[in-house]
Amino acid sequence: MNLTTALARLLIFPGLLFAVPAAWFFLWVERKAVALMQGRIGPPFMQPFFDFIKLLGKTTPQRSGVAGLLMRLWPLLAVSAAAGAVGLLPVLPSSGGFEGDLILLLALLELPSMCIIAAGFSSRSIFGEIGSAREAVLSVSYNVVFLLAIVSIAASQHTFRLEALAHLPASPLQILGIAAILVCLPAKLHLNPFSLPNAEQEIYSGPMTEYAGPELAMWELSHGLEWVAATGLVATLAAPHLTTWWLAALVFVVLSFAVVLLLSALAAATARLAIDTTVRFYWQCTLIFAVLAISSALLMRFRS
Amino acid sequence: MNIFAMLWKNLWGGSRTMLFPARPKVSEGFRGLVRFDPALCTGCAICRFRCTARAIEFKAGKGEFYWSYDPGHCTFCGRCVEGCKAHALSQDAECPPVYLTIGALKNSYTVARKPPAPKPAPAISPAAAESAVNPVPTGGAQ
């Protein structure tokens, strides 16, 4: 992948130029779908964009010292990481990539979550600290399943290159991996039933409690970009290999949209679980999945 | 799995919320804005006494009184209407309108006090009436 291709992927498609409107669109789809399933009208189409613009126009409280600097830094880091993760997705055929870009994608996908944890503790708010602690516990729990799912697919194919994984024919291990990633997505995106870190009725909005104005706008944007990156990862793994670029882009968008609808339905159908139930669920899931994934990966390696 | 059936029903069953400026239908006995009829008011100020939200203001003056009602403070509990013996207060059976300026719905009245009603003549017994016609002479006077 040369510099021009890398910049085009990062800034145009599937990078910022596509990902930012897609982030607002996915945020709207999620809110609207949940509202319709609950018998409400829901927000108008442009609402996430209006929210973003409104927040940009507000002033932020003055914060001095290192804590203030860090609080300004975390949302920017989260947006950059999420945008980078979207830019790495191999959406178009022969889009390049490099050996080991899967590892970079996993790191970038995890970075917003780390920023949220750090932001909550930096804010010195009791609600922020509780939210951050919950996010940390949740992150440790679901990431074992999430990483095992991806790494087992990669290990079975002897590659850590995303494009090679995206072009794999459908196999039981791949389906198992996609299912495991789907199980982790509600926790990664703070959706019901795993919306513990930002439980509004209990701890306001957790790590975001002390944020306002442009900084909060950046958090919202990073959350939207996380939506695009996470659903896009599932879409690229699940999409069939297509040589026409526009058809590949269309399939990517349609599959991402379907994942958003699926997650919205789950969020509307469930209530928030307690932290112990959530952790138990993911660790039990891990145990079952670990045995399945590792044994499948080993079998596939021996067969090939 | 009943929840998914419920969600599916909600998805196609239309919305229960509505967009502004549409207003929901209200049930019978709905307590809306308080209406005041100055012609019936006696100026007893029981409404002000019963209004715990301090939405009703009452100032007594010479020959007149000042009465005002601010829906911005009102909790629509209806205790003022309930306590008004002269039936000068009533409540609308519809949602209060949306307003954009503070005090836009506030109503004030300066009402002239009515002259006190003439006292009814005391009931006279037949014996007293007769004694009034033929007064009994008293010895001391003669």
Image (spheres, grey):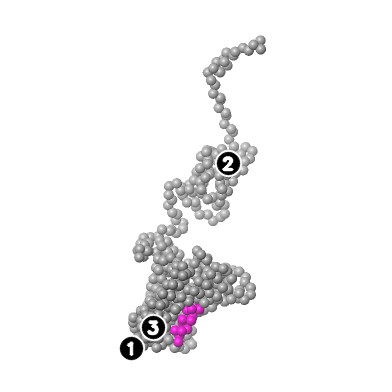
Q: Chain of mark 1?
A: A
* Same-chain check, marks 3 and 1: yes
Q: Chain of mark 3?
A: A
* Same-chain check, marks 1 and 2: no
The image shows residue B85 at horizontal and vertical percentages of: 52, 38
Query: For the point 55% across and 39% down, which residue is it?
Result: B41
Q: Which residues are magenta?
A: A100-112
B106 relative to A213, above or below = above
Specify the amino acid type for callout 2: Ala
Q: Earlier in the sequence, mark 3 or mark 1?
A: 3
Nearest the viewer among B90 and A73 is A73
Is label 3 in contact with label 2 (beta carbons under 8 Å)?
Answer: no
B122 relative to A124, above or below = above
Q: Quadrant of residue A98?
A: bottom left
Whole-number angstrom distance, CA of label 3 to CA of label 2: 82 Å
Q: Which residue is label 3 attached to? A: A294
- Residue B110 shown left or right of residue A152 in the figure: right
Tell me the tag on residue A303: 1
Q: How many residues crowd mark 3 within 10 Å: few (<14), some (14–19), many (20+)?
A: some
Nearer the viewer's eye, disc 3 or disc 2?
3
Q: How many residues crowd mark 2 within 10 Å: few (<14), some (14–19), many (20+)?
A: some
Q: Quadrant of the N terminus of chain A?
A: bottom left
Q: Which residue is label 2 attached to? A: B45
Q: Chain of mark 2?
A: B
